[in-house]
Amino acid sequence: MKNSKVLLAILLSISFIHVAKAQQSEKQVLKVSYVTNNVSDFMIGMLKKQITDPEKFSGVLNDISKYKMYHSLYHNLKTGESVFVLDSIHEVDGISTVGNVNFTIKNKEGVIHGLETFMGKEFSFEGKANTLKWNITNEKKAINKYKASKAVLVDNPEIYVWFTKDVPANAGPYMYSGLPGLILEYNELFQTASASAIQYQDLSEFNKKYSKFGTKKVKADETLVSVLSKKLNFKQTAEQGNN
């Protein structure tokens, strides 16, 4: 009987260790779901110049907002690696988008590479995550249950994000990261994205995604800076044509 109790205690101890390790493993990967559409500050401004009737403007804006892209971010909390992938697109008749991000990968060294479609052309890009410098402002707001702060790109203040320190992960959608917390929203020149769900997973799904998209690395057509410059140039061209 005594030996049986000792054996039971050992088994329970081993079981507890396995459970603890499993729980720790489950929290190693942060998965964030994002919804992206074309209702950016710039696009709203362009529409206001083109459509003066308030009712018609509201209707067009509503139609544009229905065109959505769904992405998932998988971030390894231990290594800093991340994968941002396009899951699906909800298309709307008569509505198109200037482009979409197919995927981005960030490795342990903070090097980002990805594949994107913009104005009907597909291209790859690469660069160090710390290339993009942020200015953290004093603006704050609540996003769901999280306290968020606003940060703007130093070289292009029209691009800004909202991040939260409540989720201590240096991660975010697309090429955006490098802040002391998780990026919940971003407003780019032609798109906005917002986090719709946050959860923790084990390594299996992360490894699957990282392996799949990590092998797609090819010689980059653009740098992170040149991608944003290309979009800024297109924005300026669109503004000139709208005047």
Image (cartoon, helix red, strand yellow):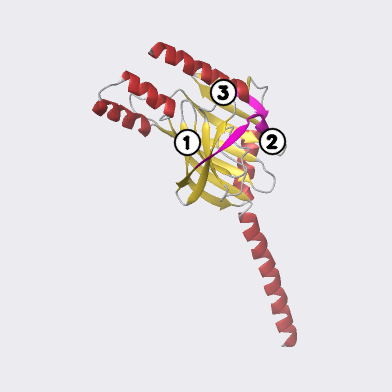
Q: Quadrant of residue 230?
A: top right
| View extreme (bottom): residue | 1
Sequence-wise first label, 3 or 2: 2
Where is residue 149? Give x, y as percent. Answer: 53, 42
Please indicate whether residue 238 sits to the left or right of residue 167 in the image.
left
In depth, the one of 145 and 110 nearer the eye is 145
Badge 1 local density, few (<14 within 10 Å), some, or many (20+)? many
**Quadrant location, the N terminus:** bottom right
Badge 2 local density, few (<14 within 10 Å), some, or many (20+)? some
In depth, the one of 124 and 225 nearer the eye is 225
Badge 3 local density, few (<14 within 10 Å), some, or many (20+)? some
Give the number of the disc on residue 228.
3
Q: Which residue is disc 1 drawn over?
A: 193
- Contact flag, marks 1 and 3 (Cβ < 8 Å): no
Disc 2 marks a residue whose amino acid type is Gly
Disc 3 marks a residue whose amino acid type is Leu
Please provide the residue range marked out in magenta: 123-139
Q: Is residue 13 above or below residue 71?
A: below
Give the number of the disc on residue 110.
2
Residue displayed at 55% across by 25% down:
156
Disc 1 marks a residue whose amino acid type is Ala
